[in-house]
Image (cartoon, grey):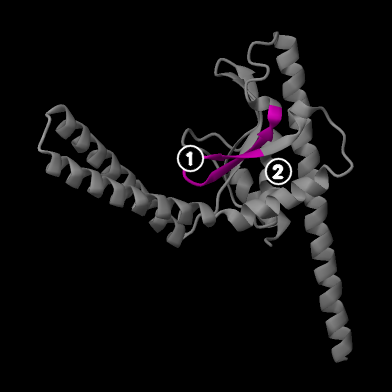
Amino acid sequence: MREWGDLFAKFSRVTDRLGMPIDTDILEMVVALNALGITTTMSCGGHIDERGFLLPWVDIEKIDPPIRELREQLIALNAETHQLRQELEEQRELQADPSMIQEAQARLKEKSEERNLLDHQVRMQQCTMRTTLVEHLSRFYEDRVVSFDRRLILHRLGLSRTRMESQGAHDFYLCAPLEIQQQKLAEYREEIMDFARFLKHIYFSHVSKNTLSVQGHREDLL
């Protein structure tokens, strides 16, 4: 676990490609997740403006050199598989020799199997961190009663990202009147903030236990 103050200072300085800082409505959640070893990659506090109607979300993903290398290999394999599939379609359209088509099918099958195995490896790298977040969410909702659409859920994005957002963020209220959208934005921000406070409590509970453990060990040595 990282020091809370250091992480808060770090993420307060983080900006996106447009130079925009992390939204204040989501900042504490970003800090809390990273403090507990759950790496965030992107986030949004939600907005209703000229950019449209967007509700709060946070993306998590374990990223280190070995995983980056696997991702690059997978991207290359995806390109190769796509190329082989195009070549096979062209041969079929041109009514090429059956033996050539069979050979192309065999190459495509082999490359697809290689691609699927590597895709599985990339996804497996995210299991530990995702499982940890699921455990925290399960504890958070043990005695918490909120509407179905407000509950925080997880779903996979792209190769290996996981997005956490309220169930209703999936266009439940895209066509709703403005006042309803504003209400849901406020509710979902509150849900994010409440979960962030829950994680913050877990973090400081761990810090307190570790401090007591160290103090006890020192006393034993005296």
Q: Which residue is drawn at 84% across and 31% down?
A: 146
Query: How many numbered discs sit on the rendered protein?
Result: 2
Tell me the quarter of the picture where residue 45 sits: top right
Is 157 within the magenta? yes
Tell me the quarter of the picture where residue 197 sits: top right
Give left or right: position of 211 versus 112: right
> In the rendered image, is residue 98 in sight?
yes
Q: What element carries label 2?
A: helix
Q: Name the residue under label 1.
A: 158
Decide whether the magenta segment is chiefly helix, strand or loop: strand
Q: Which amino acid does label 1 sit on?
A: Gly
Residue range of the region highlighted in magenta in the rendering: 154-167
Looking at the picture, how far across and down is residue 128, in whole percent?
Answer: 62, 58
Q: Mark 2 points at which residue?
A: 29
Q: Marks 1 and 2: CB-CB under 8 Å?
A: no
Q: Residue at x 75, y 13 (%)?
A: 180
> In the rendered image, is residue 24 in sight?
no
Give left or right: position of 181 versus 123: right
Looking at the picture, how far across and down is residue 107, in whole percent?
Answer: 23, 49
Q: Which amino acid does label 2 sit on?
A: Met
Q: Residue at x 70, y 8 (%)?
A: 177
Tell me the quarter of the picture where residue 114 sits: bottom left
Please state, as top left, top right, bottom left or bottom right, where the N terminus lies in the image: bottom right
Q: If you read the primary sequence from the N terminus, does the residue marked by circle 1 or circle 2 appear first?
A: 2
Q: Residue at x 11, y 34 (%)?
A: 96
Give left or right: position of 169 versus 144: left
